[in-house]
Image (spheres, rainbow, N blue to C red):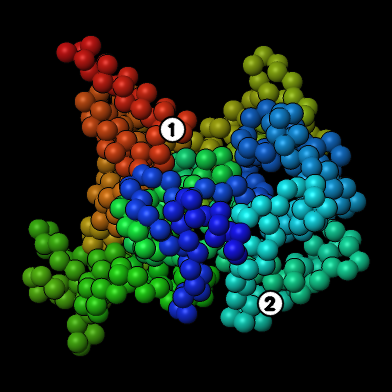
Amino acid sequence: MEDLQRTLAPTGLSVSTTPEKGRCLISTRNFSPGEVIITQEPYVCVPNNSSESKCDGCFKSVNLKKCSACQVPWYCGSTCQKSEWKLHRIECQALARLSKERRKSLTPSLRLMVRLYLKRKLQNERVFQTTATDNYNLVEALVDHMSDIGEKQLVLYAQMANLVNLILEWPNSNIKEIAQNFSKLACNAHTICDSELRPLGTGLYPVISIINHSCSPNAVLVFEGRRAVVRAVELIPQGTEVFITYVETAESTAARQKALKEQYFFTCSCPCCKKGVYLEVQESAILEGYRCKADKCNGFLLRDSDDKGFVCQTCGLVRSKEEILKISTDVKQMEDQASQFLSSGSILRLYSLLIKATEFHILLNHRMLILMGATLFRGHFLEQMLHHHKLDYLEATIVYRNIEQLQLRLCHPFSINLMRTRESLLKILMELEDWRGALTYCRYIIPAYQRVYPEIHPLVGLQYYTCGKLAWFLGDTEDAIKSLTKAVYVLQTTHGTNTTFMRDLLVRLDEARAEAAHKL
């Protein structure tokens, strides 16, 4: 810890300990909005299991080839393969010993734990350098919360520890310690995302794990490749604790508290969670409750004292329980129906994966032939799959629009459920390449995001960015400039200005401005 303190001191940070929270990160100088507070490479990391394979080195999904020996990791080229070779060399030997069935069932969590112990071994043998911010002692110092975990979860961790022991084949492995480390991963590992917050993998960043949670954080965690970067989103004065958020903040206080208690075993006491009883009730009623029947009233409803209905707190109009129950039931049935349509679309994603991943492919008359087992599917079959996939999405669009209409009658305009429905519609319309419809829903979502997120939040900036791209593509250059300008205002704080993502965004904005000037 002394080495860590000395290393952090020049960056303007210090590790402190409090009885309530344990360790925390304190600023020893002022940090301005957009300024990098701390960066860290992962101690260990792995890509997620998904329909699209990813390179172990950079998490990209292009030009991938599997490790020929163990057939587990993918690499995009020799550069990434060489950068990973020191660790993968002994991991490869362990994985190659497994049967083909066991290798197929190897989860990211198991592989992450295997790599954790291999990294420790290689650091002890001085194959990897040990530094103040990259050493196993930092992992040991993380809280495991084993005393807070239920018996069922403890049994699961013990089973997973035995699997890790089976893979490593080390005679002196400590099963209890491995189980404790699984609990540490559950509380301290971070989901690695791309610049648009799409999940790519999981990594352990022991120093960044010291940063505590707040529902109204003064910093944001983003990723540049595998490197974690924490930036200030507001002025952080000297002597102030640095906070990021651990959970989705677009929820009511009760929902956030529940998520934090279940996964991280603490009760948040940030200013956002200490609004007072009335404000908490009002927030829950707006985000999760029902709307007033009066068209021009935006009041929120609370259950009446007789439990016969819900009373608008603005105009006093009562809404019956029966009416609300009827609409809620219809919404639930439609949501199940929409899920069925979208899940059938997963068949197409399977075939898309096969096109990308299979080593046997022949291009004939512009149709792909895919070898799957002993069956050869010709191009016209894939065309039929594409056709059915599109029909599934069209059906889902109809159902979700019906859900939206019911929710507009049932929910408050700033309801989380209505916002999620519109997010689903946006994704489906993008899949269908209905750009005009997608732009409409992108604009619908922004006011909801502004209500549930702070002004400087990555999702707000990314939503403006999507609006700008769609508007420009559809020829509405003036609107594109407005949206892209707002995107830059937010994202230059959360993502910095020197990343590839931000450079591309600034180029788009410059091109849109040049196009507008040319039209004038």
Question: Measuring 23% from the left and 62% from the top, which residue is drawn there?
Answer: 412
Q: Is residue 71 left or right of residue 64?
A: right
In the rendered structure, the answer to whether residue 274 lies left or right of residue 143 reads left
307 left or right of 66 in image: left
* Label 2 Cα crowd, 10 Å radius (few <14 / some 14-19 / many 20+): some
N-term mark: 2 or 1: 2
Q: Nearer the viewer, residue 283 or 223?
A: 223
- Residue 206, given in percent of the width and then of the height, sits at 59, 59
Q: Position of residue 94 (x, y in %)?
A: 86, 52
Viewer-nearest of discs 2 and 1 = 1
Q: Camera-side residue: 425 or 376?
A: 425
The amino acid at mark 2 is: Leu
**Residue 334, placed above or below residue 226:** below
Please give the name of the residue rendered at 34% of the width and 53% of the height, measured from the top-left corner.
30
> Which residue: 35% across, 38% down?
492
Q: Considering the numbered disc 2 on the image, is that residue within a helix, a strand or a loop? A: helix
Q: Position of residue 44 (x, y in %)?
A: 67, 52
Secondary structure beneath label 1: loop
Q: Which residue is mark 2?
A: 154
Res 176 seen here: yes
- Mark 1 = which residue? 498
Residue 481 place in picture, x, y as percent: 25, 28
Residue type of the residue flagged with mark 1: Asn
In the foreground, 352 or 219: 219
